[in-house]
Image (spheres, rainbow, N blue to C red):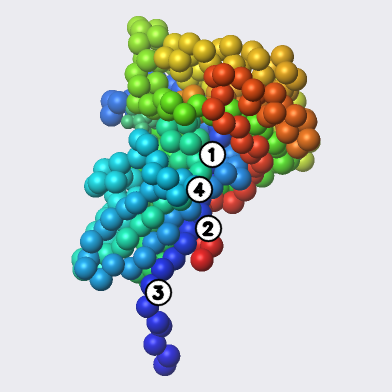
Amino acid sequence: MRAVAALRAVKVRAPAKINLHLAVGATRPDGFHQLATLYQAVDLYDTVHARRDGSGAVTVTVADAAGDPVLGVPSDGSNLCVRAALLLRAHTGLTTTGVALHVLKRIPVAGGLAGGSADAAATLLACDALWRTGLDLEALLGLARRLGSDVPFALVGGTCTGTGRGELVTAQPAGPRLTWVAATSSRGLSTPRCYAELDRLRGRERARVAELPTALLDALRGDGAGLVDALLTTARNDLTPAAMALRPGLGELVRAGAQAGARLAMLAGSGPTVLFLGADRSHASRLAAQLLGRIDVDGVHLLTGPVPGAQRVG
Ligand code: C5P
């Protein structure tokens, strides 16, 4: 029998996500909110490089595409990648194997595009390959659920419904390719703050049930041709009033994109990224150029989806 050579390094990339619909229901006893969301993975990726560390240490460094440090991402034990590696290690009973993780960050931090969740999902896959722990998707999803609400989706990718607190994902037909412009801000918005603001705005209002519109699901499960029309009529992100209260300029940006010809303008997750749907890629490029000139826009990305979830690339 041939011995399996130990791997020294593994590279995994994981995609950003957008929510084609985000309905937020009642606050649960654990403080999380009931969600009904339609996730889609888009072609903006963080890449996690994992290198074996014989000392047993689990460490992380983070840099952007220019090699510069990234503000707002911790490099201690609170980093989601470190937590993911330690969780997988504890789950599999390994104790002495370490890993040096390096994250190449392209997904804006605290931008509403689930970049931290992508990094956690990529780390789970990378360490599973590096340490040859051979977990199946169900086991990885179980760990992902413990790391964050959006982490399971980052593993699966494509187009999925998300229920529970977002962590219960069910794959759906991919639907047609959609191209969005994401207008990003260098000042992130904290997701817990956004949910807390939503609670404050809702006050004593009766608890709501989060549901996805039947028209949206029917359009997706048919031949997909009606998806854009269904999106235009049902588009909703319940975090919008909260994000706009915390970042008053966002409403103006949404209006500007709609005036510039976007088919749809909506907040990405808990913001502050705003998404503008283009008719096609060249229309989206023109929209992006217009938005980039605005003082409240620090960057633009053309995002196309759906794409697969976390994948080994080296
Ligand atoms: O699950 P995750 O760690 O990504 O969530 C970050 C924060 O967002 C939570 O601590 C909570 O404040 C808020 N959240 C929520 N309801 C959800 C998902 C997230 O209140 N369904």
61 up-or-down from 27: above or below: below
Residue 285, image quadrant: top right
150 up-or-down from 122: above or below: above
Task: State the residue position of label 2.
Answer: 311
Q: Nearer the viewer, mark 3 or mark 4?
A: 4
* Residue sitting farthest toward the bottom: 1
Mark identifier at residue 229: none
Disc 2 from disc 1: Cα separation: 15 Å
Disc 3 from disc 1: Cα separation: 30 Å
Task: State the residue position of label 4.
Answer: 65
Q: Amino acid at mark 3?
A: Leu
Disc 4 from disc 1: Cα separation: 19 Å
Find out whether the residues at labels 4 and 1 contact each other: C-beta distance under 8 Å.
Answer: no
Judge the density around disc 3: few (<14), some (14-19), many (≥20) Cα neighbours within 10 Å: few
Report if the beta carbon of the residue with label 1 is closer than 8 angstroms to ligand 1: no
Disc 3 from disc 4: Cα separation: 25 Å
